[in-house]
Image (cartoon, helix red, strand yellow):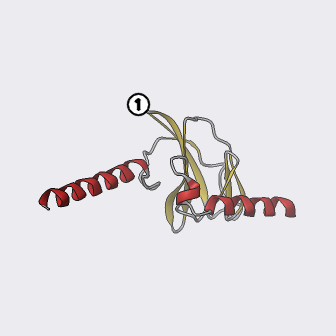
């Protein structure tokens, strides 16, 4: 019985370690080098989008963060690229590399996640909202 309990504890710990290693929180990303900030201010001027290029031993990535009076939070993480196109659609929506994102959503876009399992449709909802905004123009 003692061996069974020990085995269950070890397997449980390994599962949590793998989950923590693969599906990390987007708020815990490396800083990187600032490449864009002044041209990325929201239409109201209350929020700004800062884009960073992160280079390390594993490769290159792009990190995007929203700075607002309520604080700063990461909104975008994409590995394997060092070029980015970003613009504000309106005060609540930003378009980064053709991915529309809610500027207030701290969950954001993280290329490491499987969105069908972990995002529960948030990215799909962003695309739907983006299409609706473009059809009105």
Please tell me whether residue 58 is drawn above or below residue 52 in the rendered image: above
| Image side of residue 32 versus residue 88, left or right | left
Determine the image quadrant of residue 134.
Answer: bottom right
Please tell me whether residue 29 is drawn above or below residue 35 in the rendered image: below
Determine the image quadrant of residue 97.
Answer: top right
Residue furthest left in the image: 2
Quadrant of the frame with the C terminus: bottom right
The residue that label 1 is drawn on is: 57
Please tell me whether residue 136 is drawn above or below residue 24 in the rendered image: below
Residue at horizontal 41%, vertical 31%?
57
| Image side of residue 78 versus residue 55, left or right | right
Quadrant of the frame with the N terminus: bottom left
Residue furthest bottom in the image: 70
Residue 50 in the image, given as x and y percentages of width and height: 57, 50
Residue at horizontal 71%, vertical 58%?
127
Q: Which of 1 and 125 is in front in this view?
A: 1
**Mark 1 nearby-residue class (10 Å; few <14, some 14–19, many ≥20):** few
Residue 85 in the image, given as x and y percentages of width and height: 68, 43
| Image side of residue 104 versus residue 124, left or right | left
Residue 133 in the image, given as x and y percentages of width and height: 79, 62
Q: Nearer the viewer, residue 108 or 72?
A: 108
Residue at horizontal 86%, vertical 64%?
136
Residue at horizontal 18%, vertical 61%?
5
SS of the residue at dot 1?
Answer: loop
């Amino acid at each position: 019985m003692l061996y069974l309990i020990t085995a269950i504890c070890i397997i449980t710990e390994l599962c949590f370690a793998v989950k923590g290693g693969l599906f990390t929180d987007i708020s815990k990303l490396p800083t990187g080098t600032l490449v864009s900030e002044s041209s990325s201010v929201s239409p109201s001027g209350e929020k700004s989008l800062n884009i960073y290029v992160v280079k390390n031993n594993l490769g290159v990535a792009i990190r995007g963060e929203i700075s607002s009076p309520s604080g700063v939070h990461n909104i975008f993480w994409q590995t394997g690229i060092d070029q980015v196109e970003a613009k504000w659609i309106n005060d609540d929506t930003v378009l980064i590399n053709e991915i529309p994102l809610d500027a207030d959503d701290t969950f954001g876009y993280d290329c490491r996640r499987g969105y069908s399992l972990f995002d529960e449709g948030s990215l799909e909802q962003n695309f739907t909202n983006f299409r609706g905004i473009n059809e009105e123009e």
